[in-house]
Image (cartoon, rainbow, N blue to C red):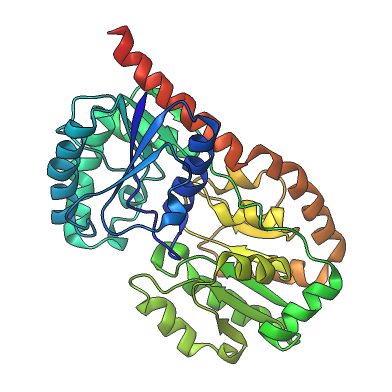
């Protein structure tokens, strides 16, 4: 069988949420099913590290699709032309877009509908594209995979899609995230924060990530707690960072905030594993991979009580209202002062993390693809 896949988010040294989902699930799927031929569709020059085995055939389609007009050109012209030549049995698109011009079975992965909840966080043209096309993508798809029960419910409610058309695959957490012993943690802290304990936020900086309230909460925490605690921001500045950076500039303790930018995975694993806690208080997430990665690293988590985050967190984190600076601050105080709480959360995290792995993701996504193929065969 031939399986064509949209792999335009496989970008060397630039993998983030959707990119990691694509990388981790496809790598396992390709290796587990040598009987199938996988055709990877890139929108620019690709790295050989993404050609996981001999049963992968890469294709570069023009134009590079990083703008609404180019998204349309890529999915409605370039992809149909390529699929006509390849003649695959199914097309898997892992980034929430598909082709309305293609008649073969298509599997659409929807990670979240954040634009439906926070439309002010998206520029006008992109929002128009999403509002018009995403409901049509969902209706046109043969099957849909979502990364959480929350997103599945969101899709069924907002687009009136039958629940039995949607499979929940969840995300996993990279296995490179592991606990470090006390001596290793000490060395990392000396390198990163001058030896001081720290909270860490891991992810891109943009409005939905709520970093501005995290800054306010950290300032209030420092005012009450004192000490030499730091706040590490490990991620690139994405878009609309003005509010977060203006808040940062007004902070009393801004000299205790350390921006590390986008880290290589091996670096992030060490920095995360040496933290007092992960502070992941986003306003909205389709899943929230850093929550699982912190659990893998043996680090307790502060996260939000909205969207999918409680589903991922279970009872293994401190849950806060992300709109409440005071609740975030109080959670930081608890993490900094209550060692028994931290140990209890770490122990619960060791159980909760077993629900999520990239092996399970790959298996569930493959099953979703096979169901789409079976729909065609049963017609």
* Location of residue 5 in the rendering, given as x and y in whole percent from the top left corner: 34, 39
Residue at 71% across, 70% down: 275
Image mark count: 0
Q: Nearer the viewer, residue 139 or 33?
A: 33
Corner quadrant of residue 335: bottom right
Q: Quadrant of the N terminus?
A: top left
Q: Nearer the viewer, residue 243 or 193?
A: 193
Q: Quadrant of the C terminus?
A: top left
* Location of residue 111 in the rendering, given as x and y in whole percent from the top left corner: 41, 44
Q: Nearer the viewer, residue 145 or 120?
A: 145
> Residue 286, can we see it?
no
* Location of residue 327 in the rendering, given as x and y in whole percent from the top left corner: 62, 64
Residue at 81% across, 50% down: 347
> Residue 378, can we see it?
yes
Up/down of 254 relative to 52, above or below: below
Q: Nearer the viewer, residue 313 or 188?
A: 188
Up/down of 142 relative to 282, above or below: above
- Residue 89 in the figure: left or right of residue 174: left
- Residue 195 in the figure: left or right of residue 78: right
- Residue 56 in the figure: left or right of residue 215: left
Up/down of 7 relative to 366, above or below: below
- Residue 68 in the figure: left or right of residue 271: left
* Location of residue 352 in the rendering, given as x and y in whole percent from the top left corner: 71, 43
Residue at 14% across, 33% down: 101
Residue at 84% across, 58% down: 343
Q: Residue furthest top?
A: 378
């Amino acid at each position: 069988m031939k399986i064509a896949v949209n792999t335009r988010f496989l970008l060397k040294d630039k993998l983030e949420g959707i990119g990691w989902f694509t990388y981790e699930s496809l790598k396992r799927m390709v290796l587990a099913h040598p009987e199938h031929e996988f055709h990877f569709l890139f929108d620019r020059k690709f790295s050989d590290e993404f050609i996981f085995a001999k049963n992968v055939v890469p294709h570069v389609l023009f134009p590079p699709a990083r703008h609404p007009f180019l998204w349309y050109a890529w999915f409605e012209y370039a992809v149909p032309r390529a699929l006509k030549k390849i003649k695959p049995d199914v097309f898997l698109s892992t980034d929430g877009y598909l082709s309305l011009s293609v008649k073969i079975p298509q599997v659409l992965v929807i990670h979240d509908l954040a634009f439906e909840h926070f439309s002010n966080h998206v520029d006008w043209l992109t929002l128009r594209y999403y509002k018009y096309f995403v409901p049509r993508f969902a209706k046109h798809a043969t099957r849909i995979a979502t990364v959480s029960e929350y997103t599945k419910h969101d899709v069924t409610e907002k687009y009136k899609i039958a629940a039995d058309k949607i499979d929940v695959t969840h995300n996993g957490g990279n296995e490179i995230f592991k606990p470090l012993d006390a001596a290793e943690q000490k060395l990392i802290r000396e390198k990163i924060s001058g030896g001081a304990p720290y909270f860490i936020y891991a992810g891109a900086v943009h409005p939905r990530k709520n970093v501005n309230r995290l800054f306010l909460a950290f300032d209030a925490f420092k005012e009450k707690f004192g000490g030499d605690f730091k706040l590490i921001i490990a991620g690139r500045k994405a878009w609309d960072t003005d509010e977060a950076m203006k808040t940062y500039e007004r902070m009393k303790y801004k000299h205790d905030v350390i921006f590390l930018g986008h880290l290589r995975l091996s670096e992030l694993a060490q920095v995360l594993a040496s933290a007092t806690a992960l502070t992941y208080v986003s306003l909205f997430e389709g899943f929230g991979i850093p929550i699982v990665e912190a659990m893998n690293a043996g680090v307790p988590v502060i996260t939000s009580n909205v969207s999918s985050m409680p589903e991922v967190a279970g009872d293994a984190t401190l849950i806060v209202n992300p709109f409440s600076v005071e609740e975030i601050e109080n959670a930081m105080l608890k993490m900094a002062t209550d060692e028994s709480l931290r140990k209890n959360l770490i122990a619960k995290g060791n159980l909760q993390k077993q629900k999520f792995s990239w092996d399970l993701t790959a298996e569930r996504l493959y099953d979703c693809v096979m169901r789409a193929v079976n729909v065609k065969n049963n017609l």
